[in-house]
Image (tube, rainbow, N blue to C red):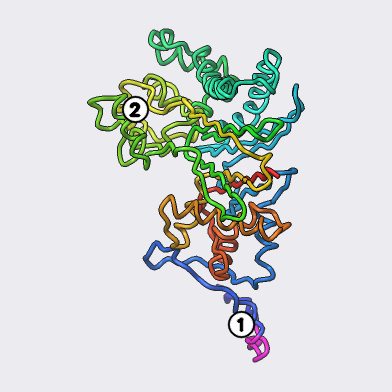
Amino acid sequence: MPPIIYNVVSLPAATSSDNLNALEEVKDFLTTDLGRGGSERWTYRLLPEHSLNSEIERISTPQSHRSVDSVTFQPCTTYTARSQDRYSIEEWDLPGGNWLFTAIYDGHCGHDTVTYAQRRLPSMVRMSLQALLKSASSSSLRPELVSRTLYDTIRHLDDSIRSDLFDLFPPDKLERMSDSQIKQHILNNGAAWAEISPMCTQGSTVLITLTDPSRKNLWVANLGDSQAVLGTRRSPGKWTPVVINASHNGNNPSERQRIMREHPGEPYSISEERVVGYLAPTRAVGDTWLKIPAAYSRRLFTKYCPEWMSPRQVHEFANRILTPPYVSDIPEVYHHTLNVSNPIEDYFLILCSDGLQDLYDGVDMHFNDRQMVDRWVKIVGQAIDSRETRNLALRLLRDGIGGDNVQLVSRNLTLEIEEKWMDDVTILIQRFR
């Protein structure tokens, strides 16, 4: 038997300067348990102050569109963890002048429904508003007519998803079909099913604003748990917040009570502050499977919708669908009259997805709702008073990810982790002067 020959690699011993260089390379790296406890740790890099703002800007891509500043933030860069937030900022030249439309869409369970909402809703609102203005001039337009237009348009958007599904599988037809007929029908309509099914199993909150050409009238329409806060000031007084909309999620006692009233005797209609124990938002576009009979989940989505829930989860939640709908598509619409012609009154508007408030919880800065909006308005108001030219949404984002605490900000920017560990954050701030 021939002798075994091993290849040997000789490595020189590290010199003292090599050791110093290695230590220099890792001196700025720290670890955290993300407040989860246990032995697992994740690495992040401590950045110098002069690098923090440039890194925040790189991740959040701040934009300024005339009177509106925006950022959208998700530091986890893996493809599967990319942000499900979207937003719109549009100016429309309509009869009577320029209308300003803004919106935040916060998607959940996927990207199809939120992308659909962002693509369709602005043009739908514009067309409906244009039709309304043809019948009444902007100077004599009653605010309640615009409110109704926003209300109807949002509901129409959601209904279009449900209608596409029912066109393909009418409820009475689905009831009569065998499993093999369902399978063949999906094969015969593969492209339509591939487009419809994700939007029925995903959802998106919607928060939109509309400002008329005079900038004296502001409408806010909400479906979900994003937030609109109006900062107001009568000079020389301080800025004060006005919370415009209610939050439509399971944390809101009035929403929980509404669902229980609509589904009496059903203990799981709202469970653990989630709709049927599954979904946190109580109102949204999409989430069609929670608005229609459970047969669709059992016979269609669980078998022919890739990357949805496991059969065990579908069985558990579908058994709780007795008297749909459970997720509502009824938005709440608010109108505010702004006295912008008075030189001593001033305003700005903050719109944000729910991820902004979650940021503060992630850095152990717990505020009740009032303290939270007080803080936001104070930060933005101080920036306006100091005539800061920097993007206002970026200023508020910096506070949320740690403010002056360089270690916290660095952690939120550079944490080395493959999974998404913070909620998506989108902020729009509109000035009225």
**Does 316 appear above or below 22?**
above
Residue appearing at x 69%, y 54% in the figure: 391
x, y (%) of residue 285?
Answer: 51, 28
Q: Is residue 168 magenta?
A: no
Q: Is 431 located above or below residue 110 in the figure?
A: below
At 46% from the left and 58% from the top, the residue drawn is 362
Q: Residues within 10 Å of mark 1 (few under 14, many from 20)?
A: few
Q: Position of residue 48 (x, y in %)?
A: 65, 73
Q: Picture quarter containing residue 283? A: top left
Residues 132 and 172: in front is 132
Please provide the residue range marked out in magenta: 11-20
Confirm whether residue 358 shows in the render.
Answer: yes
For label 2, the residue is: 318
Q: Which label number is shown at residue 302?
A: none
Q: Which residue is mark 1?
A: 23
Residue at mark 1 to residue at mark 2: CA–CA distance: 56 Å
